[in-house]
Image (spheres, grey):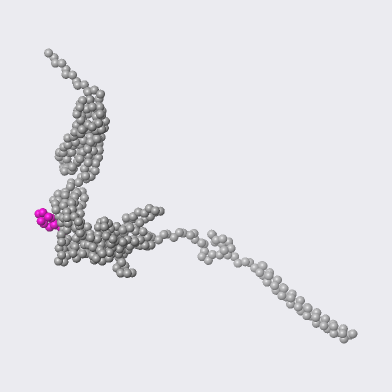
Amino acid sequence: MVAETGSGSKWRLVLSMSLLFMLILQSGHCQKEEEEAKTVVGRKPKTTKTKPGQRPGKSSRSGTPKPRVKAPAPPAAHTYLTQVVNKGKFQKVGDTLSVRAGDTLELRCKGSSVQWGLPPYLEEDDEGRLRTAQHERYGTLTLANSTGADTGEYTCFPMYCEDTECRKEYDKAVKVFIFFPDPQELFVPSEDYYEIIQLRTNWPTVLPCQVTSPGARVTLHREFPPAEVAVDGTEISFNVKRGFTIHRPKPHHAGGLYCVASLGNLRQSSTKYMLIYVNYPMAPPTPVIQASSSSVGQGENLQVVCTVLGEQDVLIDFSWEYPGQQMGRPLYTQDSVRPVGGGAARQQSQSVLLVDEVRDVDQGTYTCTAQNLEGSKSASTTVKVLTTPRSKAKPKPQKP
């Protein structure tokens, strides 16, 4: 009984010691966790300063966010022309371009919508040699079997469209003058043997002696008496793209003229130009109208005078509107022109409307219209017809 008791006590002691050691370990582990928990709970959290415009709780590495600004639209691309010289090879064109007659011309114009301006010959009849096409970013012009007659100005017009309406942007147009040198034709062909051109005193006159080659030498000649006309660059000048320009036309410039072009061993004459001198006025006429009387009795005669004071040698045409016109009253007028003294050369043009034996139908408004090459203007006056003729003063009786 004693051994069993001692042995049982021994095992109970060992068991108790084991339990005590486990309790000590568990207590130390819990204390450590508690201290760590206290440390975490008591530790101040990391603070971040909130900047203006930043929401709390959110950090920003780049600082205060800047307001979004809409980026400016890129500048519009400039319209320009290029020539297709080979497949996939292009060259930008300048003011002028030369393409040998017979070759194919191909132009490209940058723009999502463009239209082409052509020389008069191609606008009238291109004989199926001309093709234009619009692509996504450019338009093309192709001219096959070119001739010297195709020489002229080619223009690319960018189009501005709103909804379904489009218009040409003339200020952004790109132009090139293209020569088509022809070994047989130095001048651009014309169907007219004679071309009549007015020499206007107030406007430069152009003789379009257009050559097909920019290298041709061009001179101006008078038909009768035969002579070469001096080209000094001031009174008369020459431009290979336009021809000869008479800047201030005078009466002595009138007559038959023509151009002569020479290149190498080839020499040719152009169409003949018949220049007619016309003294163009500076402005439309200003008529002044006046009736012989503002009131006239029945059976009396009436005169309405329309006068224009203007430049010398300027033709004035007069036309009338008068009350009796609707009733079939015939028009009787007397027109005259006479010079007026003074420093400048002036003249007075006059038209007088004659109304004989006035009747009731002649009462109303009389209008005179004066017209010259620059335009027309009108003037009016009103005439009243009295029911009875105005009484004439009786002669005083003579004393015996």
Image location (x, y in percent) of residue 222: 13, 55
Image quadrant where one finds the N terminus: bottom right
Residue farthest along the top direction in this orientation: 400
Q: Is residue 363 magenta?
A: no
Tell me which corner region of the image, top left, top right, bottom left or bottom right, holds residue 210: bottom left
Q: Is residue 353 visible?
A: no
Name the foreground residue: 58 vs 51.
58
> Which residue lies at the image location 83% right of the left edge and 81% below the top edge?
12
Image location (x, y in percent) of residue 76: 37, 60
Tell me which corner region of the image, top left, top right, bottom left or bottom right, holds residue 378: top left
> Which residue lies at the image location 19% right of the left edge and 50% below the top edge?
198
Residue farthest along the front direction in this orientation: 127
| Left or right of 156 on screen, residue 300 | left
Tell me which corner region of the image, top left, top right, bottom left or bottom right, holds residue 52: bottom right
| Left or right of 61 on screen, residue 134 | left
Q: Is residue 344 above or below residue 126?
A: above
Residue farthest along the bottom direction in this orientation: 3
Name the foreground residue: 10 vs 223.
223
> Which residue lies at the image location 53% right of the left edge and 59% below the top edge?
53
Image quadrant where one finds the C terminus: top left
Q: How many marks?
A: 0
> Which residue lies at the image location 74% right of the left edge and 74% below the top edge?
27
Q: Is residue 388 visible?
A: yes
In the rendered structure, which segment of residues is drawn in magenta?
A: 219-230
Image location (x, y in percent) of residue 72: 42, 59
